[in-house]
């Protein structure tokens, strides 16, 4: 599940934001740099209220992977097909909603209930994600993300329950804001 979570950040709002992909340009796409991969995302087509995207992931070791992503009109992910597996979100994921949101994630045969609590600091969406464990919720990760006008991430940082961290940014002419995100995200607080 940890391998697919960075790709979830390419998705967008569940609650507070008001994104509408009906205005998405036909040539929409971008390149992003992650710690161990370079991802090229491009818009393929829309069918009704479902928008199809392709991600070409080139891993640091040279492997390539093509991932298909389906999002709804509000830019929330409903489905990933990553070649040797699939992830589905019912009714959709919560990224990057502000407030509390619940969804069910099915990764191949594994089904997980997820609770997402999000808030905003200036233009940064901070989200704590929890996984259902019996009657309680276990902390899974904290993400701090800057999104574009279509609800797709620009820069992000993430801290997992075990202290592992990740970061990514778009390859673009303006400087990334990774250092600022680490200050806002406060990984120590996320783990406490």
Image (spheres, grey):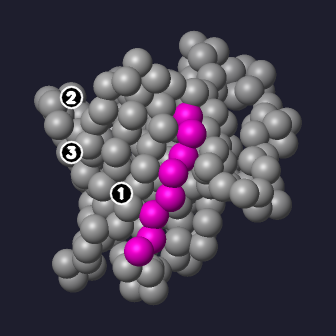
**Residue at (54% x, 46% y) in the render:** 32
Tell me if label 2 and label 1 are in contact, CB under 8 Å. Answer: no
**Residue at (26% x, 73% y) in the render:** 45
Residue picked out by circle 2: 110
Residue 91 visible within the image: no
Q: Quadrant of residue 188?
A: top right
Q: Does residue 3 appear to the left or right of 153 in the view shown?
A: left
Of labels 2 and 3, the one closer to you: 3
**Residue at (84% x, 42% y) in the render:** 180
Residue picked out by circle 3: 81
Residue 103 spot, x, y in % from top left: 36, 49
Q: Does residue 163 appear to the left or right of 43 in the view shown?
A: right
The residues bearing labels 1 and 3 have C-alpha atoms spaced at a distance of: 12 Å
Residue picked out by circle 1: 77
Secondary structure type for disc 1: strand
Q: Earlier in the sequence, mark 2 or mark 3?
A: 3
Q: Earlier in the sequence, mark 2 or mark 1?
A: 1
- The correct choice, above or below, for 177 with respect to 11 in the image is above
Q: Does residue 76 appear to the left or right of 169 in the view shown?
A: left
Specify the segment rendered in magenta: 27-34
């Amino acid at each position: 599940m940890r391998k697919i979570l960075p790709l979830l950040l390419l998705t967008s709002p569940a609650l507070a934001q008001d994104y509408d992909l009906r205005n998405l340009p036909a040539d929409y796409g971008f390149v992003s740099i992650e710690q161990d991969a370079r991802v090229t995302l491009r818009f393929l087509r829309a069918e009704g209220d479902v928008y199809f995207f392709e991600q070409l992931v080139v891993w640091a070791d040279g492997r390539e992977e093509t991932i298909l992503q389906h999002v709804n009109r509000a830019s929330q992910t409903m489905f990933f097909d990553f070649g040797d597996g699939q992830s589905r979100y019912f009714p959709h994921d919560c990224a990057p909603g502000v407030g509390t949101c619940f969804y069910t994630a099915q990764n191949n045969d594994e089904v997980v209930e997820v609770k997402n609590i999000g808030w905003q600091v200036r233009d940064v969406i901070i989200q704590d994600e929890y996984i259902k464990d019996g009657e309680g919720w276990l902390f899974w990760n904290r993400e701090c993300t800057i999104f574009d006008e279509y609800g797709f991430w620009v820069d992000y940082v993430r801290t997992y329950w075990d202290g592992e961290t990740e970061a990514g940014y778009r390859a673009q002419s303006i400087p990334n804001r990774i250092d600022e995100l680490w200050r806002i995200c406060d990984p120590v607080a996320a783990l406490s």
